Image: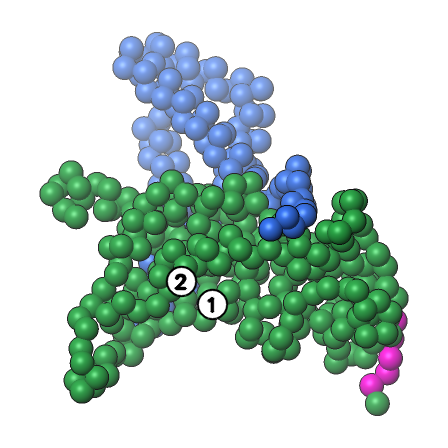
Chain colours: A blue, B green
């Protein structure tokens, strides 16, 4: 055909739109979720080794820098949870209740409430176990 | 008479017969509150520069021809109003992620080829003679695909999809939404054939759930939902093979 079309570069595409920045933030927070899962996995391994190694692991997590890290990670995980449930309605088959399609905001809201309840349950259970 | 106001439209121009890259050209125009961006471009073409090239047809958001980037957002020019971009300037560019043919016109060849591949028409489950009457559907049957049938092939979702921009081998949101529309139709019998396209790495798995496609869709089709429902179907079918399924 010999037409001279122009294809625009994609460099820095994720900075072009706030929506893409939020998407990249969501993907990045997943990395921290994996890293923290590894920290918890180490805790399980220490627990298997006995009481002293586990208490040593807990003591390490109670130092100043470890607490600062947890505060930072809490913010990261809250964003991860929010963004996860925001995209959830787009990833699932329609839920029909009484002949009506459940709106996206109801699915997102239900997910956030469920994760809040689960977080509180884990927190309470751990406090009872630690006591 | 509505009061006239002024705004500047910056257009990304591209001349395939020249030897340079695209460049921005500013056109100050006078407009009234009822004027769309498309009407602004038509005014430029009629009174300032007849060489300005863009596609349009229906002026009422149904033909899907006037898709373009308006201030960086994939939009239908006929459905976007100049008053919403005050004080301006507003920037108009050809749809992102497609090769530019000239000015605001893109090469839609890739999209059209993909559309043909998914066979976007009903392939009857059982072919009946005309005398046997219509293929009947219940309202529930219609509900299963109706939303996805609203697609007007405007390609805004492709301009919203960075994965398509990074690798245009991926089937993309709009075509997958139409694949889902026909596969979900109770009268259709070609879902197995279409799903072969969905299973490919360039099928539904090219999507990383950015979700912006559904935000920009002027017809609320929610292509991200169609793609992700078919990821589930594709995964189920993959594992079903080990259980003696399809």
On whether residue B197 falls in the magenta region, the answer is no
**Of marks 1 and 2, which one's residue comes earlier in the chain?**
1
The chain under label 1 reads B
Residue at mark 1: B151
Front one among B190 and A16: B190
Which residue is the extreme one toward the left? B244
The region drawn magenta spans B2-6
Residue, disc 2: B178
Q: In the rendered image, which quarter contains the N terminus of chain B?
A: bottom right
Query: What residue is shown at x 43% (from left), y 28% (from top)?
Result: A34
Tag 2: Cα neighbours inside 10 Å, few (<14), some, or many (≥20)?
many
User: Alpha carbon of mark 1 to alpha carbon of mark 2: how far?
Assistant: 7 Å
Query: Label 2 lies in what chain?
Result: B
Disc 1 packing (10 Å; few <14; some 14–19; many ≥20): many
> Residue B211: x, y in percent?
50, 52
| Above-or-below relation of B149 to B200 | below
Left or right, B106 with reference to A81: right
Contact flag, marks 1 and 2 (Cβ < 8 Å): yes
Q: Main secondary structure of the magenta part?
A: strand
Q: Residue A30: horizontal and vertical position, in percent? A: 47, 34
* Residue at 47 percent of width and 51 percent of height: B172
Instruction: Tell me which corner region of the image, top left, top right, bottom left or bottom right, holds residue B2.
Output: bottom right
């Amino acid at each position: 055909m010999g037409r001279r079309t122009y294809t625009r570069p994609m460099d820095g595409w994720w900075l072009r739109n706030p929506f893409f920045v939020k998407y990249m933030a969501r993907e990045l927070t997943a990395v921290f979720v994996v890293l923290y899962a590894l920290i918890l996995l180490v805790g399980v391994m220490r627990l298997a080794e006995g009481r002293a190694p586990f208490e040593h692991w807990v003591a390490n997590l109670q130092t100043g820098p470890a607490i600062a890290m947890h505060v930072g990670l809490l913010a990261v995980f809250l964003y991860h949870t929010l963004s996860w449930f925001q995209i959830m309605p787009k990833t699932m088959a329609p839920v029909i209740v009484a002949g009506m399609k459940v709106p996206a905001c109801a699915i997102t809201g239900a997910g956030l409430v469920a994760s809040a309840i689960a977080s509180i349950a884990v927190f309470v259970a751990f406090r009872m176990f630690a006591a | 008479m509505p009061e006239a106001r002024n705004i500047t439209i910056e257009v990304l121009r591209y001349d395939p017969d020249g030897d340079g890259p695209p460049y921005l050209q500013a056109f100050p125009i006078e407009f009234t509150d009822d004027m769309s961006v498309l009407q602004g471009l038509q005014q430029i073409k009629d009174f300032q520069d007849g060489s300005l090239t863009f596609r349009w047809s229906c002026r009422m958001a149904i033909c899907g021809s006037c898709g373009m980037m308006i201030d960086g957002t994939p939009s239908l020019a006929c459905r976007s109003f100049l008053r919403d971009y005050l004080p301006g300037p507003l920037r108009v560019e050809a749809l992102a992620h497609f090769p530019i043919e000239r000015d605001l016109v893109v090469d839609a060849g890739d999209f059209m080829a993909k559309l043909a591949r998914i066979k976007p028409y009903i392939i009857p489950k059982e072919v009946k003679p005309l005398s046997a009457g219509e293929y009947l559907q219940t309202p529930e049957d219609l509900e299963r695909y109706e939303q996805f049938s609203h697609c007007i092939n405007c390609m805004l979702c492709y301009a919203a999809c960075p994965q398509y921009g990074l690798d245009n081998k991926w089937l993309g949101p709009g075509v997958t939404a139409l694949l889902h529309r026909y596969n979900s139709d109770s009268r259709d019998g070609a879902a197995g054939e279409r799903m072969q396209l969905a299973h490919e790495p360039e099928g539904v798995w090219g999507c990383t759930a950015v979700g912006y496609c559904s935000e920009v869709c002027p017809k609320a089709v929610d292509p991200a939902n169609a793609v992700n429902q078919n990821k589930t179907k594709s995964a189920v079918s993959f594992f079903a093979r080990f259980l003696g399924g399809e």
